[in-house]
Image (tube, rainbow, N blue to C red):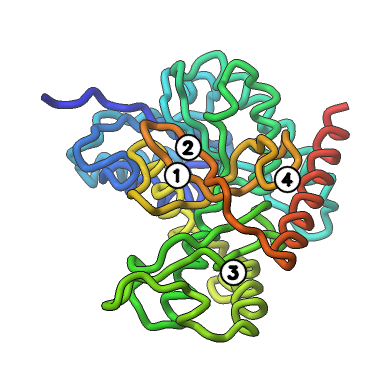
Amino acid sequence: MAKDPVRVLVTGAAGQIGYALVPMIARGVMLGVDQPVILHMLDIPPAAEALIGVKMELVDAAFPLLKGVVATTDVVEACTGVSVAVMVGGFPRKEGMERKDVMSKNVSIYKSQASALEKHAAANCKVLVVANPANTNALILKEFAPSIPEKNISCLTRLDHNRALGQISERLNVQVSDVKNAIIWGNHSSTQYPDVNHASVKTSAGEKPVRELIADDEWLNGEFITTVQQRGAAIIKARKFSSALSAASSACDHIRDWVLGTPEGTWVSMGVYSDGSYNVPAGLIYSFPVTCKNGEWSIVQGLHIDEISRKKLDLTAQELSEEKELAYSCLS
């Protein structure tokens, strides 16, 4: 029997990431090739005409799974009835702007979108925040949508996770699908900690630890980490635009695994509400290794954290605590 369509919201839908993301959703990359969707696209009034253009292209592409398109600048119309919300819209940092200026712009955006989602979205709506500062934007959204369960609000660190897998696969000249269980800890910023201590690669002789196969701790503890941390900046330098295709693809990965589940024995990285696991302060949106089943994520427990890792986990938590304080000061 055909499934009922799922309403999926994409904010900032006329932007670079939105333009890459909506066709992926319409093709079934996010929710599965048997799941019809109705796309809700929201953008700001200056982008209204571009948004109509995106809607025209979606119609022209004749996606079999796409059962309807709502293109609007009205936040209430955009949020009504949605079961998945991908928050790509935000205020980007411009030259000469202080962090607090950017934060206060985003706090007001996420405050208004949070209340619209809370009042008008479907009961068990899953929310993914992509716009930077993603972790703190997600925290603000959580604060202003108290009736949305905290387990339903997340931020995107899957892009960083996928970047880590990509670097390992390039280094070892193996298929990226054979690399698993890297971890991104903390903030989606340059303090994030890409951790390979528990990662493995599928070889003809079974699964082998990444550290053993690469056998170069200097690279793994140095260049590998900085490459993943600063990959976004490297892409801007090369393309003159920020990552769009890879961000859209990893947003699909994040939601797909959350809704449909992670493969047995595999975990992924998601920015989720900390419960104090791994001595990370509770009340931050922090990236952890998680497994997903039946639409719920769970933090992977009991992983050994060595001394070097401990310092890096604490450093990124410290930055998130400072961001949280800055965001709250914008509210007062």
> Residue 250's x, y, as percent?
44, 53
The residue to which callout 4 is attached is: 279
Q: Nearer the viewer, residue 193 or 50?
A: 193
> Residue 312's x, y, as percent?
73, 62
Mark before the other along the chain sequence, 2 or 3: 3
Mark before the other along the chain sequence, 2 or 4: 4
Check the image and report above or below for 250 versus 257: below
Name which residue lies at 43% across and 31% down.
Answer: 84
- Marks 3/1: CA distance? 22 Å
Q: Which is closer to the viewer, label 3 or label 4? A: 4
Which image quadrant: the N terminus? Answer: top left
Mark before the other along the chain sequence, 2 or 1: 1
Residues at circles 2 and 1 in contact by the CB criterion of under 8 Å: yes
- Marks 2/3: CA distance? 24 Å
Q: Element type at marker 2? A: strand
Q: Element type at marker 1? A: strand
Q: Amino acid at mark 3?
A: Val
Name which residue lies at 27% across and 26% down.
Answer: 5
**Residue 153 lies in what quarter of the image?**
top right
Name which residue lies at 53% across and 19% down.
Answer: 76
Mark before the other along the chain sequence, 3 or 4: 3
- Marks 4/1: CA distance? 19 Å
> Residue 189's x, y, as percent?
68, 57
User: On the rendered structure, is 275 left or right of 15?
Assistant: right
- Marks 3/4: CA distance? 24 Å
Q: Element type at marker 4? A: helix
The residue to which callout 2 is attached is: 297
Q: Nearer the viewer, residue 157 or 69?
A: 157
The residue to which callout 3 is attached is: 228
